[in-house]
Image (spheres, rainbow, N blue to C red):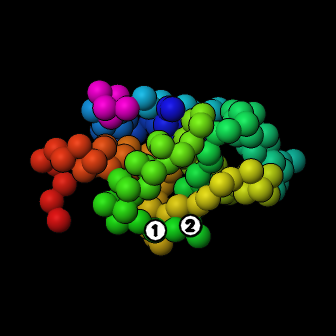
Amino acid sequence: MKICLLTIGKTTTPYLKEGIEEYISRISRMIQFEMRNLPDVKTSKKLTPELQKISEGEMILSQFQGGDHVVLLDERGKEFTSRQFSEFIERQTMAVSKNLYFVVGGPYGFSQGVYDRANSMMSLSKMTFPHEMVRMFFVEQLYRACAISRNLPYHHD
């Protein structure tokens, strides 16, 4: 099983890009992991936020196969402590037959089709963050979860 962070758009802020690459390097020594960036949908006056969500949703949905487990990173999702997230990852690696996807939507969120396909939702915080920061926070927490499950001296309660 592979874990994939699926995002819309690229990370362009240099210090976030560097941090994300560092944590991906650390994660990849422990589990199969990929961060896949889908292209931004170009906005125009004719493209309403709803149409943008639908267009992004079609790209997102095209990435999944049957048996994939899809978790949306959404402000209305379940919140975890770092230990609970580590336990969640461990449970999913045993239960999921294909891949485990964590998905960061575009600037307007997810289309209804993406919500319908999702198996669950999780929230990194009740606060709103720029999507580039969400990527950084997520890969750090995934690394932390892996470190916790391997009893590495990274996480301190």
> Picture quarter containing residue 100?
top right
Q: Is residue 2 visible?
A: yes
Which residue lies at the image location 44% right of the left edge and 55% below the top edge?
88
Amino acid identity at mark 1: Glu
Label 2 and label 1: CA atoms lie apart by: 6 Å
Q: Position of residue 23 (x, y in %)?
A: 30, 37
Q: Is residue 22 visible?
A: no
Asked if residue 112 is positioned above or below residue 66 in the image, the reply reads below
Which residue lies at the image location 59% right of the left edge and 70% below the top edge?
76
Which residue carries the number 2 mark? 77
Which residue lies at the image location 50% right of the left edge and 64% below the top edge?
123
Circles 2, 1 touching at the beta carbon (< 8 Å):
yes
Crowdedness near tag 1: few (<14), some (14–19) or many (≥20) residues, C-alpha within 10 Å: some
- On the rendered structure, is 55 left or right of 107? right
Which residue carries the number 1 mark? 79
- Magenta stretch, residue numbers: 27-31
Residue 29 sits inside the magenta stretch: yes
Q: Position of residue 9 (x, y in %)?
A: 58, 37
- On the rendered structure, is 99 left or right of 52? left
Amino acid identity at mark 2: Gly
Query: In front here: 99 or 94?
Result: 94
Q: Can you say which quadrant of the picture contains the C terminus?
A: bottom left
Asked if residue 126 is positioned above or below residue 60 in the image, the reply reads below
Going by the picture, which residue comes out furthest to the right?
A: 46
Which residue lies at the image location 59% right of the left edge and 37% below the top edge?
97
Crowdedness near tag 2: few (<14), some (14–19) or many (≥20) residues, C-alpha within 10 Å: some
